[in-house]
Amino acid sequence: MKNKKIGTLIIIVCSVLWAISGICGQLLFSRTSLSTPFLTMVRLAVSGLILSGMAFFSNPQKFLLLFKNKKDMLNAFIFSVFGCMAVQYSYFAAIEASNAATGTILQYMSPIFVVVTMSALHKKLPTIAEGLCCILAVAGVFLVSTGGNIKSLSISPEALFWGIFSAGCLAYYNIAPVNLVKKYGAMEIVGLGMLLGSVMLGVLVRPFGVPMEGVDIVAIAEIVIIIIFGTIIPFAAYPKGVAIIGSTKSSIIATSEPMSAFLISLFILGEKYPPLSIVGFFFIVLAVIFITLSGKKENNDRK
Protein backbone atom coordinates (compact mmCIF):
# COMPACT_ATOMS: atom_id res chain seq x y z
CA MET A 1 0.00 0.00 0.00
CA LYS A 2 2.83 2.38 0.85
CA ASN A 3 4.51 1.70 -2.50
CA LYS A 4 1.21 2.41 -4.30
CA LYS A 5 0.96 5.79 -2.58
CA ILE A 6 4.55 6.59 -3.51
CA GLY A 7 3.89 5.60 -7.13
CA THR A 8 0.76 7.74 -7.26
CA LEU A 9 2.65 10.68 -5.75
CA ILE A 10 5.43 10.30 -8.34
CA ILE A 11 2.94 10.45 -11.24
CA ILE A 12 1.14 13.48 -9.76
CA VAL A 13 4.40 15.37 -9.14
CA CYS A 14 5.65 14.57 -12.65
CA SER A 15 2.37 15.74 -14.19
CA VAL A 16 2.38 19.00 -12.25
CA LEU A 17 6.04 19.61 -13.17
CA TRP A 18 5.21 19.16 -16.85
CA ALA A 19 2.35 21.64 -16.44
CA ILE A 20 4.66 24.17 -14.77
CA SER A 21 7.11 23.67 -17.63
CA GLY A 22 4.41 24.70 -20.10
CA ILE A 23 3.52 27.73 -17.98
CA CYS A 24 7.18 28.79 -17.91
CA GLY A 25 7.28 28.45 -21.69
CA GLN A 26 4.23 30.70 -21.99
CA LEU A 27 5.83 33.32 -19.73
CA LEU A 28 9.07 33.23 -21.73
CA PHE A 29 7.25 33.74 -25.03
CA SER A 30 5.20 36.63 -23.62
CA ARG A 31 8.11 38.51 -21.98
CA THR A 32 11.14 37.75 -24.16
CA SER A 33 12.12 37.46 -27.82
CA LEU A 34 12.98 33.76 -27.45
CA SER A 35 11.39 31.55 -30.09
CA THR A 36 9.96 28.03 -30.15
CA PRO A 37 12.89 26.59 -32.18
CA PHE A 38 15.51 28.04 -29.81
CA LEU A 39 13.75 27.01 -26.59
CA THR A 40 13.03 23.52 -27.95
CA MET A 41 16.62 23.01 -29.06
CA VAL A 42 18.04 24.12 -25.69
CA ARG A 43 15.58 21.95 -23.78
CA LEU A 44 16.32 18.87 -25.88
CA ALA A 45 20.10 19.38 -25.93
CA VAL A 46 20.66 19.93 -22.21
CA SER A 47 18.05 17.40 -21.06
CA GLY A 48 19.23 14.81 -23.57
CA LEU A 49 22.85 15.26 -22.55
CA ILE A 50 22.08 14.86 -18.84
CA LEU A 51 19.66 11.92 -19.27
CA SER A 52 22.09 10.15 -21.62
CA GLY A 53 24.89 10.76 -19.12
CA MET A 54 22.79 9.30 -16.31
CA ALA A 55 21.98 6.26 -18.44
CA PHE A 56 25.61 5.78 -19.45
CA PHE A 57 27.04 5.98 -15.94
CA SER A 58 24.35 3.71 -14.49
CA ASN A 59 25.01 0.96 -17.06
CA PRO A 60 27.69 1.74 -19.70
CA GLN A 61 27.48 -1.66 -21.42
CA LYS A 62 23.71 -1.46 -21.86
CA PHE A 63 23.87 2.10 -23.18
CA LEU A 64 26.66 1.39 -25.70
CA LEU A 65 24.95 -1.79 -26.88
CA LEU A 66 22.49 0.32 -28.88
CA PHE A 67 25.27 1.78 -31.04
CA LYS A 68 26.31 -1.73 -32.13
CA ASN A 69 22.92 -2.50 -33.66
CA LYS A 70 22.41 -0.55 -36.91
CA LYS A 71 18.70 -1.34 -37.18
CA ASP A 72 17.95 -0.26 -33.61
CA MET A 73 20.10 2.84 -34.03
CA LEU A 74 18.14 3.79 -37.16
CA ASN A 75 14.86 3.31 -35.31
CA ALA A 76 16.19 5.41 -32.42
CA PHE A 77 17.13 8.17 -34.87
CA ILE A 78 13.68 8.12 -36.49
CA PHE A 79 12.12 8.27 -33.02
CA SER A 80 14.36 11.22 -32.11
CA VAL A 81 13.07 13.24 -35.08
CA PHE A 82 9.39 12.30 -35.29
CA GLY A 83 9.02 11.59 -31.57
CA CYS A 84 11.23 13.69 -29.30
CA MET A 85 11.88 16.67 -31.58
CA ALA A 86 8.42 16.86 -33.15
CA VAL A 87 6.56 16.51 -29.83
CA GLN A 88 8.57 19.19 -28.04
CA TYR A 89 8.58 21.62 -30.98
CA SER A 90 4.85 21.35 -31.73
CA TYR A 91 3.98 21.59 -28.01
CA PHE A 92 5.87 24.86 -27.54
CA ALA A 93 4.59 26.16 -30.89
CA ALA A 94 1.01 25.58 -29.69
CA ILE A 95 1.79 27.39 -26.42
CA GLU A 96 3.46 30.29 -28.23
CA ALA A 97 0.38 30.64 -30.45
CA SER A 98 -2.09 30.38 -27.55
CA ASN A 99 -1.25 29.52 -23.92
CA ALA A 100 -0.01 26.61 -21.82
CA ALA A 101 -3.46 25.28 -20.90
CA THR A 102 -4.72 25.21 -24.50
CA GLY A 103 -1.50 23.70 -25.84
CA THR A 104 -1.47 21.02 -23.15
CA ILE A 105 -5.13 20.06 -23.43
CA LEU A 106 -4.96 19.73 -27.22
CA GLN A 107 -1.84 17.57 -26.92
CA TYR A 108 -3.75 15.29 -24.56
CA MET A 109 -5.89 14.15 -27.49
CA SER A 110 -3.04 11.75 -28.28
CA PRO A 111 -4.91 8.61 -27.03
CA ILE A 112 -7.48 9.24 -29.77
CA PHE A 113 -4.71 9.12 -32.37
CA VAL A 114 -3.43 5.93 -30.74
CA VAL A 115 -6.88 4.31 -31.05
CA VAL A 116 -7.21 5.33 -34.71
CA THR A 117 -3.67 4.20 -35.53
CA MET A 118 -3.98 0.83 -33.80
CA SER A 119 -7.37 0.22 -35.41
CA ALA A 120 -5.88 0.92 -38.84
CA LEU A 121 -2.85 -1.30 -38.20
CA HIS A 122 -5.01 -4.19 -36.99
CA LYS A 123 -7.64 -3.53 -39.70
CA LYS A 124 -10.56 -3.41 -37.31
CA LEU A 125 -13.04 -0.77 -36.23
CA PRO A 126 -12.72 0.87 -32.79
CA THR A 127 -15.02 -0.49 -30.10
CA ILE A 128 -18.23 1.38 -29.31
CA ALA A 129 -16.62 2.80 -26.16
CA GLU A 130 -13.57 3.96 -28.12
CA GLY A 131 -15.79 5.51 -30.79
CA LEU A 132 -17.79 7.43 -28.18
CA CYS A 133 -14.55 8.65 -26.59
CA CYS A 134 -13.35 9.89 -29.98
CA ILE A 135 -16.62 11.78 -30.47
CA LEU A 136 -16.31 13.27 -26.97
CA ALA A 137 -12.73 14.36 -27.69
CA VAL A 138 -13.65 15.92 -31.05
CA ALA A 139 -16.52 17.76 -29.36
CA GLY A 140 -14.04 18.97 -26.75
CA VAL A 141 -11.65 20.29 -29.40
CA PHE A 142 -14.56 22.01 -31.13
CA LEU A 143 -15.56 23.78 -27.91
CA VAL A 144 -11.97 24.68 -26.99
CA SER A 145 -11.28 26.13 -30.43
CA THR A 146 -14.59 27.95 -30.97
CA GLY A 147 -15.96 28.62 -27.50
CA GLY A 148 -19.24 27.25 -28.87
CA ASN A 149 -19.46 29.87 -31.63
CA ILE A 150 -19.22 28.06 -34.99
CA LYS A 151 -18.66 31.35 -36.82
CA SER A 152 -15.31 32.12 -35.20
CA LEU A 153 -12.30 30.57 -33.49
CA SER A 154 -11.49 31.45 -29.88
CA ILE A 155 -7.88 30.38 -30.55
CA SER A 156 -5.75 31.04 -33.62
CA PRO A 157 -5.71 28.52 -36.51
CA GLU A 158 -1.97 28.20 -35.87
CA ALA A 159 -2.56 27.18 -32.24
CA LEU A 160 -5.21 24.66 -33.30
CA PHE A 161 -2.90 23.16 -35.94
CA TRP A 162 0.12 22.84 -33.65
CA GLY A 163 -1.99 21.50 -30.77
CA ILE A 164 -3.55 18.72 -32.84
CA PHE A 165 -0.23 18.02 -34.60
CA SER A 166 1.39 17.73 -31.18
CA ALA A 167 -1.24 15.17 -30.15
CA GLY A 168 -0.44 13.09 -33.22
CA CYS A 169 3.29 13.32 -32.52
CA LEU A 170 2.74 12.32 -28.88
CA ALA A 171 0.79 9.27 -30.05
CA TYR A 172 3.77 8.27 -32.20
CA TYR A 173 6.09 9.03 -29.27
CA ASN A 174 4.14 6.57 -27.10
CA ILE A 175 3.83 3.81 -29.73
CA ALA A 176 7.09 3.84 -31.70
CA PRO A 177 9.82 3.15 -29.13
CA VAL A 178 8.10 0.36 -27.17
CA ASN A 179 10.45 -2.40 -28.34
CA LEU A 180 13.52 -0.18 -27.99
CA VAL A 181 12.56 0.77 -24.43
CA LYS A 182 12.02 -2.88 -23.49
CA LYS A 183 15.44 -3.77 -24.87
CA TYR A 184 17.56 -0.82 -23.73
CA GLY A 185 15.55 1.13 -21.11
CA ALA A 186 13.43 4.30 -21.11
CA MET A 187 16.13 6.72 -19.97
CA GLU A 188 18.59 5.41 -22.56
CA ILE A 189 16.17 5.79 -25.48
CA VAL A 190 14.55 9.07 -24.39
CA GLY A 191 17.89 10.67 -23.47
CA LEU A 192 19.51 9.73 -26.76
CA GLY A 193 16.34 10.67 -28.63
CA MET A 194 16.36 14.16 -27.12
CA LEU A 195 20.06 14.61 -27.86
CA LEU A 196 19.74 13.53 -31.49
CA GLY A 197 16.53 15.54 -31.83
CA SER A 198 18.29 18.72 -30.72
CA VAL A 199 21.01 18.16 -33.33
CA MET A 200 18.45 17.62 -36.10
CA LEU A 201 16.46 20.68 -35.03
CA GLY A 202 19.64 22.75 -35.16
CA VAL A 203 20.36 21.48 -38.68
CA LEU A 204 16.81 21.90 -40.00
CA VAL A 205 15.75 25.20 -38.40
CA ARG A 206 19.08 26.79 -37.44
CA PRO A 207 17.69 28.69 -34.42
CA PHE A 208 20.97 30.48 -33.80
CA GLY A 209 21.64 34.17 -33.26
CA VAL A 210 18.27 34.64 -31.57
CA PRO A 211 17.74 38.13 -30.09
CA MET A 212 17.92 38.03 -26.30
CA GLU A 213 15.50 40.88 -25.64
CA GLY A 214 13.86 40.56 -22.24
CA VAL A 215 16.13 37.71 -21.15
CA ASP A 216 16.94 38.45 -17.50
CA ILE A 217 17.58 36.41 -14.37
CA VAL A 218 13.89 35.49 -14.16
CA ALA A 219 13.87 34.24 -17.75
CA ILE A 220 17.01 32.19 -17.13
CA ALA A 221 15.38 30.71 -14.02
CA GLU A 222 12.33 29.75 -16.12
CA ILE A 223 14.57 28.02 -18.67
CA VAL A 224 16.28 26.11 -15.85
CA ILE A 225 12.87 25.09 -14.48
CA ILE A 226 11.82 23.84 -17.94
CA ILE A 227 15.00 21.79 -18.33
CA ILE A 228 15.48 20.39 -14.82
CA PHE A 229 12.02 20.29 -13.26
CA GLY A 230 9.99 20.09 -16.47
CA THR A 231 12.12 17.55 -18.32
CA ILE A 232 14.95 15.73 -16.54
CA ILE A 233 13.21 14.94 -13.24
CA PRO A 234 9.80 13.88 -14.63
CA PHE A 235 11.22 11.93 -17.58
CA ALA A 236 13.51 10.05 -15.20
CA ALA A 237 10.89 9.52 -12.47
CA TYR A 238 7.71 8.85 -14.47
CA PRO A 239 8.70 5.32 -15.62
CA LYS A 240 9.36 4.42 -11.97
CA GLY A 241 5.86 5.55 -11.02
CA VAL A 242 4.37 3.55 -13.89
CA ALA A 243 6.31 0.48 -12.76
CA ILE A 244 4.73 0.78 -9.29
CA ILE A 245 1.06 1.51 -10.08
CA GLY A 246 0.71 0.41 -13.72
CA SER A 247 0.19 2.22 -17.01
CA THR A 248 -3.61 2.51 -16.83
CA LYS A 249 -3.74 4.24 -13.46
CA SER A 250 -0.73 6.36 -14.44
CA SER A 251 -2.44 7.55 -17.62
CA ILE A 252 -5.53 8.58 -15.67
CA ILE A 253 -3.58 10.36 -12.93
CA ALA A 254 -1.44 12.09 -15.58
CA THR A 255 -4.51 14.05 -16.68
CA SER A 256 -3.64 16.25 -13.71
CA GLU A 257 -1.14 17.88 -16.11
CA PRO A 258 -3.68 19.68 -18.34
CA MET A 259 -5.86 20.38 -15.31
CA SER A 260 -2.88 21.90 -13.46
CA ALA A 261 -1.96 24.00 -16.50
CA PHE A 262 -5.57 25.15 -16.81
CA LEU A 263 -5.93 26.09 -13.12
CA ILE A 264 -2.60 27.93 -13.05
CA SER A 265 -3.51 29.82 -16.24
CA LEU A 266 -6.94 30.69 -14.90
CA PHE A 267 -6.22 31.68 -11.30
CA ILE A 268 -2.57 32.79 -11.34
CA LEU A 269 -1.97 34.14 -14.85
CA GLY A 270 -5.49 35.51 -15.19
CA GLU A 271 -6.25 33.89 -18.56
CA LYS A 272 -9.85 34.29 -19.72
CA TYR A 273 -11.70 31.37 -21.32
CA PRO A 274 -15.22 31.25 -22.78
CA PRO A 275 -17.42 29.04 -20.56
CA LEU A 276 -17.92 26.48 -23.33
CA SER A 277 -14.15 26.28 -23.89
CA ILE A 278 -13.82 25.23 -20.25
CA VAL A 279 -16.45 22.55 -20.89
CA GLY A 280 -14.35 21.46 -23.87
CA PHE A 281 -11.29 21.09 -21.63
CA PHE A 282 -13.19 18.68 -19.41
CA PHE A 283 -14.60 16.78 -22.40
CA ILE A 284 -11.07 16.01 -23.61
CA VAL A 285 -9.87 14.97 -20.15
CA LEU A 286 -12.91 12.71 -19.69
CA ALA A 287 -12.32 11.18 -23.13
CA VAL A 288 -8.73 10.33 -22.14
CA ILE A 289 -9.85 8.77 -18.85
CA PHE A 290 -12.66 6.75 -20.46
CA ILE A 291 -10.52 5.53 -23.35
CA THR A 292 -7.83 4.44 -20.87
CA LEU A 293 -10.39 2.50 -18.82
CA SER A 294 -11.84 1.05 -22.03
CA GLY A 295 -8.40 -0.22 -23.02
CA LYS A 296 -7.93 -1.83 -19.60
CA LYS A 297 -11.32 -3.58 -19.84
CA GLU A 298 -10.51 -4.87 -23.33
CA ASN A 299 -7.19 -6.27 -22.12
CA ASN A 300 -8.90 -7.98 -19.17
CA ASP A 301 -11.52 -9.48 -21.49
CA ARG A 302 -8.77 -11.07 -23.56
CA LYS A 303 -7.20 -12.80 -20.54
Image (tube, rainbow, N blue to C red):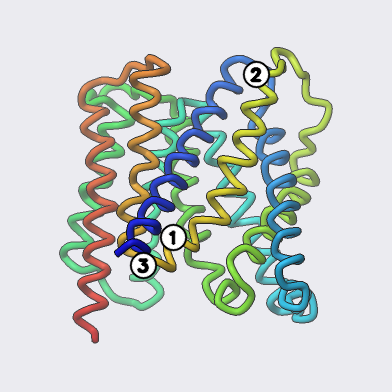
Please say whether residue 116 is visible from this viewpoint: no
Distance in Å between CA atoms under marks 1 and 2: 31 Å
- Secondary structure, mark 3, is loop
Label 2 near label 1: C-beta < 8 Å? no
Position of residue 5 relative to residue 262, above or below, is: below
Given the image, on which type of amino acid does mark 3 rest?
Answer: Gly
Q: Residue at x 44, y 35 (%)?
A: 103
Label 3 near label 1: C-beta < 8 Å? no
User: Position of 31 compared to 259: left or right?
Assistant: right
Callout 2 environment at 10 Å: few (<14), some (14 to 19), or many (20+)? few
Per the image, the residue denoted by label 3 is: 246
Question: Between 149 and 298, which is closer to the camera in this rendering?
Answer: 298
Distance in Å between CA atoms under marks 1 and 3: 8 Å
Per the image, the residue denoted by label 1 is: 241
In the rendering, which numbered label is found on residue 218? 2
Position of residue 226 relative to residue 220, above or below, is: below
Given the image, on which type of amino acid does mark 2 rest?
Answer: Val
- Secondary structure, mark 1, is helix
Q: Position of residue 66 (x, y in %)?
A: 73, 75
Q: Earlier in the sequence, mark 1 or mark 2?
A: 2
Callout 3 environment at 10 Å: few (<14), some (14 to 19), or many (20+)? some
Q: Residue at x 28, y 61 (%)?
A: 292
Callout 1 environment at 10 Å: few (<14), some (14 to 19), or many (20+)? many
Q: Earlier in the sequence, mark 2 or mark 3?
A: 2
Q: Position of residue 109 (x, y in %)?
A: 36, 48
